[in-house]
């Protein structure tokens, strides 16, 4: 059978890693796919740069449109990132009847509904395993492996850079900026690293996971997103004292009222496996009604882990190229005409437990005032640490853990507590999930 010709858009970390894996494992890969897979063309912004891969057998160009318009190319790998040029290229490739594999979470989270519609009309596949959690086959696991379940919730560490920063800060007391610079040098961080530390990258990935878990259209704009820049060393230490770790989690949960879609720093019990996922590693915990909790763990970023997912998608495309489009696995796991519009809940309607850190005056009645306000909002206190004031100091830190409540009740309680004359400054609030 004729080999399948691949055109790669972008020869950076992921593109270079993909070329290397396709070459090194060519024989095994073609034994799996049933055909030879050859990278014939690739585009890059500049041609004279040093690369992590050997490009001697590949025709290079600086114009990616040459590749998507080349009739000899069967499958396009979109590995340039971003959601403007990448979108034009992917839509053009689809228009030309080519299958597409992408690692681009922003593209899928923001424009996936439109892209999949065009792809279905043209009878081509758009696969995106590498867009979520790097090398972990989480899309395939949820879309296919858990197809018999109602997914109740999922929670994941889905940004390697953020997890690397939190881990290094906790273990080595390193500086935020210093660890971020290292993540950038290692090729983990996004082109705009605020996407990593502000949770935008994780929200892109969570949007995709929620769609394939619950059969809903992609709705990135409805995700609640909070970054890790406000986490202090004190919070990390108090959390540990109480038996918790702070992780930057993406959480999607189906409730009676709708679906929660949220990314924020979260205290989780230190005995949970996911609390011990460190460095650039990712993990996703998925709770299905039949299977119970399942955990997927692996490298969430980097050249070859991401290439592993890209190449798996290429093999899937090659195997399915001759199949009837109606009988392929649907892009978002559920048949396109069976997606449902379950409401996505606003931040006010999220239900979770909380860690609160306050600075209070050392005088009688302070704790009673705080407890009274929480009680008025039906918020129950679960644990409390009060530190002794240092010598000659009249202010002391007070740390509270609460039971689950609605975010709007907590917002109201925090405003009232901050207004007490005995409470100084603003309250640090970190959400807490037991992930039972
Ligand atoms: N910047 C991303 C991360 C890359 O750190 O997880 C992988 O999507």
Image: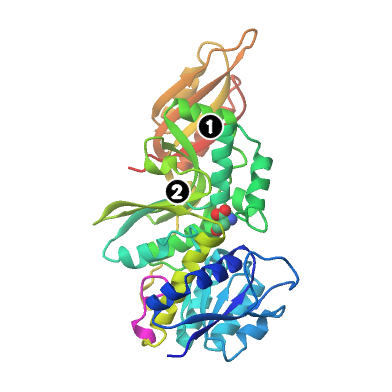
**In the rendered image of this protein, does residue 135 appear above or below residue 367?**
below
The image quarter containing residue 421 is top right
Circle nearer the N terminus (1, 2): 1
- The residue sitting at the top extreme is 392
- Residue at label 2? 349
Q: Is residue 327 a member of the stretch shown in magenta?
A: yes
In the rendering, at what x and y percent does residue 218 appear? 48, 66
Q: Is 140 situated left or right of 410 in this image? A: left
Q: Is 57 situated left or right of 300 in this image? A: right
* Mark 2: secondary structure: helix
The image quarter containing residue 379 is top left
Which of 75 and 31 lies nearest the eye of the viewer?
31
Instruction: Decide whether the magenta segment is chiefly helix, strand or loop.
Output: loop
The image quarter containing residue 273 is top left
Q: Quadrant of the N terminus?
A: bottom left
In the rendering, at what x and y percent does residue 258 appear? 39, 57
Q: Residue at x 58, y 12 (%)?
A: 389
Q: Is 4 situated left or right of 287 in this image? A: right
Quadrant field for ligand 1? bottom right
Disc number placed over residue 194 in the picture, else none: none
**In the rendered image of this protein, does residue 199 appear above or below residue 239?**
below
Residue 357 in sight in this render: yes
Q: Residue at x 52, y 27 (%)?
A: 237
The residue range painted magenta reads: 325-336
Disc number placed over residue 236 in the picture, else none: 1
């Amino acid at each position: 059978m004729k080999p399948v010709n691949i055109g790669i858009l972008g020869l950076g970390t992921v593109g270079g890693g993909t070329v290397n894996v396709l070459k090194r494992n060519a024989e095994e890969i073609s034994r799996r796919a049933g055909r030879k897979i050859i990278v014939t063309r690739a585009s890059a912004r500049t041609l004279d740069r040093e690369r992590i891969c050997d490009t001697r057998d590949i025709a290079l160009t600086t114009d990616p449109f040459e590749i998507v318009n080349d009739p000899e190319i069967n499958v396009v790998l979109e590995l340039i990132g971003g959601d403007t040029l990448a979108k034009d290229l992917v839509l053009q490739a689809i228009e030309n009847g080519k299958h597409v594999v992408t690692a681009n979470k922003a593209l899928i989270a923001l424009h996936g509904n439109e892209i999949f519609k065009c792809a279905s009309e043209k009878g081509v596949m758009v696969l995106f395993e590498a867009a979520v959690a790097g090398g972990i086959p989480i899309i395939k696991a949820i879309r296919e492996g858990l197809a018999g379940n109602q997914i109740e919730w999922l929670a994941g560490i889905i940004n390697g850079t953020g997890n690397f920063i939190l881990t290094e800060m906790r273990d080595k007391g390193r500086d935020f900026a210093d660890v971020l610079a290292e993540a950038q040098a290692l090729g983990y961080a996004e082109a705009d690293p605020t996407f990593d530390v502000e949770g935008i990258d994780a929200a892109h990935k969570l949007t995709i996971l929620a769609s394939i878990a619950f059969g809903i259209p992609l709705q990135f704009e409805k995700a609640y997103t909070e970054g890790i820049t406000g986490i202090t060393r004190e919070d990390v230490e108090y959390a540990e004292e109480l038996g918790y770790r702070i992780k930057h989690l993406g959480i999607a949960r189906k409730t009676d009222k709708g679906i929660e879609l949220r990314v924020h720093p979260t205290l989780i019990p230190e005995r949970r496996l996911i609390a011990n996922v460190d460095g650039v590693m990712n993990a996703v915990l998925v709770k299905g009604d039949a299977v119970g909790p399942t955990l997927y763990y692996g490298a969430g970023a980097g050249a070859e882990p991401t290439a592993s997912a890209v190449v798996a998608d290429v093999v899937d495309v090659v195997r399915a190229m001759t199949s009837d489009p109606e009988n392929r696995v649907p892009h978002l796991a559920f048949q396109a005409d069976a997606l449902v519009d379950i409401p996505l809940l606003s931040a006010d309607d999220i239900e979770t437990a909380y860690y609160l850190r306050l600075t209070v005056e050392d005088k009688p009645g302070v704790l009673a005032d705080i407890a009274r306000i929480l009680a008025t909002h039906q918020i129950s206190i679960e644990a409390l640490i009060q530190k002794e004031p240092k010598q000659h100091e009249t202010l002391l830190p007070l740390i509270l853990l609460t039971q689950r409540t609605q975010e709007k009740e907590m917002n109201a309680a925090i405003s009232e507590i901050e207004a007490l004359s005995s409470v100084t400054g603003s309250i640090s609030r970190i959400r807490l999930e037991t992930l039972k």
